[in-house]
Amino acid sequence: MSDVTGSWAPSFSLAFKLLCLSRLLAAIYSNISDCDEVFNYWEPTHYLQYGLGLQTWEYSPVYAIRSWAYALLHSTWAGVMEMLVSKNKPTVFYETRGLLAIASATTEACLVDAVVKHVNPKVGRDLFFMLFMSTGLFVASTAYLPSTFAMYAVTLATAVSLEKPGRLRTYALVLIYGVGSLLGWPFSAAAGTPFAVEELFLSGRRLMRLRHLLEAIIATLLLVLGPMVLLDSTFYRKLVVVPLNLVLYNVFSGADKGPDIFGTEPWWFYLLNGSLNFNVLFPMYLLALPLQLLPANVMLGIFSLQPHKEERFLFVVYPLICFNASIALFIARSWIQNAASFFTSRTVGRRASRAFAAIFFAIFTVLSLSRTLALYFHYHAPLDVYPQLHYRVPTGSATSSKEINLCVGKEWYRFPSHYFLPDGVRLRFLKSSFDGLLPKYFEEHHLLTHVEVTGMNDQNIEAMDRYVPIESCDFVIDYTPPNAQFHPDAAEPLYSLDEEHWVKHYCKPFLDSASTARLARAFYVPGLGSKSWGEYCLLKRRHVL
């Protein structure tokens, strides 16, 4: 479509199709960047679908800070894909990611369409291109995380918030924010702060709007939280309100618990992370901070103040970072055009504005492509190596009396889930320098989710029963840095160099971050030197098979 001045902007249909293409590419090629995604979401989903999976302490009935409703939603889709499309588990994994891609594309297209109709077509056009090319959205859009689920909700809610105020808008916004925060991530409710301020303080007929707001909150609690409590209480076999448990643990559990024990980052963590994921978009977004009170600003402020910081926490507002940046770009272009027109002519002013935008988007596109390609070419090896087990494990292992043990030591956090392991293969942990609490297998029967496995605690205290001796391993996945030497007595032996016991079965290059310059590992530039590569390998014990 185009406005009266002739500025082109994408229709909802075109925006959805192109964003869907971008997100499906992310579903296929993006990495798993967070072990929490695997152990807290893919593993419980695999357990619901196949009766096998690893349990973290969060799913212990003693603590119950993760909702089975969220995992059940995804395992249902995965089960349908298994029945209708393919029984191959890696395929089911990527088909489930495909659902996430479509969900993200839908909500993003809704936001673009709302901005085109209710803000400005030029802003909507720029927003679409920012979303389409952004590395941040490439990473976040298909991540199986509550913060990504909440991102879908916040993006859709922002689109609805641009509509004319009224009762239906209020009900819709509260319901959308409620689904995102209750079924997804409770802390995403903070993104609704600007909407609540508008409802209560910035509009007329406050009593009526307050009544509508309260009605909507009560209805959302009944429609969303009520079924969640019923389902989770059934799984845990006791009354639990999971969103409340999660907030209580992360905010009120004390200094020896909560987020502080899982690592902290400096206040500028999100500034650096945002610059990597959005490059020139991020400073443009920051320039908009004094001009707007939008959810992205609220969330950035809240999470920058918290000591525990992770990239996924800010996924919630990634599309809104692009929205803020598109508005800031529109304002900057107007200033440039007006200034140039004042000193020269309107024609020169328009050309200056277009030149600025062209240079801006050229830099954004090149840096985004370079960063996205770097993530794939530098760090995608685990998702290439693990599927090779389907070709290396002997036929019939699923019915064999002997389980096949695949062991991981220091590489435990890059395990991509049991969707990449053949039937009959079990993941085992080798002792490494990591001294926190590793997960342990659920009881291997469906719906025994109320059973407490041994060694769980909420203080990240190491449990030694998680480890097996290397002699029990049939296969090992390990990373070997360049120019390394084998030391059998090392805390983390490099098993691929122990040629007496292990043979390389399949290896892929993996960038060695410790010996590669920052810019070289952060961006992909063909022919750029100063990169150092190690090997990510599937190893087979010599006497196996």
Image (cartoon, helix red, strand yellow):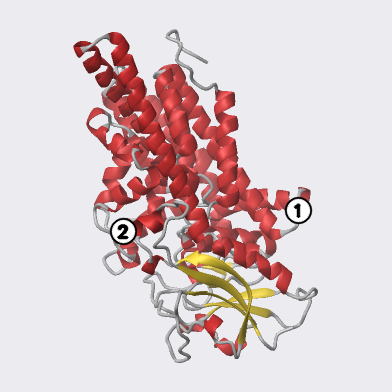
Specify few, some or many for label 1: CA neighbours under 10 Å numbering under 14, 14-19, or 20 or more. Answer: some
| Closer mark to the observer between disc 1 and disc 2 | 1
The residue pinned by badge 2 equals 308
Q: What residue type is labelled 1?
A: Ser
Q: Which of 64 and 396 is in front in this view?
A: 396
Image location of residue 463, percent across then percent down = 45, 80
Q: Nearer the viewer, residue 445 or 475?
A: 475
The residue pinned by badge 1 equals 86
Image location of residue 322, percent across then percent down = 39, 35
Vertical side of 237 occupied by 342: above or below: above
Image location of residue 233, percent across then percent down = 54, 57
Q: Which type of secondary structure does the marked residue at label 2 adopt? A: loop
Q: Which amino acid does label 2 sit on?
A: His
Vertical side of 544 occupied by 100: above or below: above
Image location of residue 109, percent across then percent down = 52, 30
Q: Which residue is found at the position 37% from the left and 37% from the top?
A: 321
Marks 1 and 2, how far apart in space?
40 Å
Is residue 72 found left or right of 165 in the rendered image? right
Q: Which residue is found at the position 49% from the left and 72% from the top?
A: 411
Is residue 223 found left or right of 366 in the rendered image? right
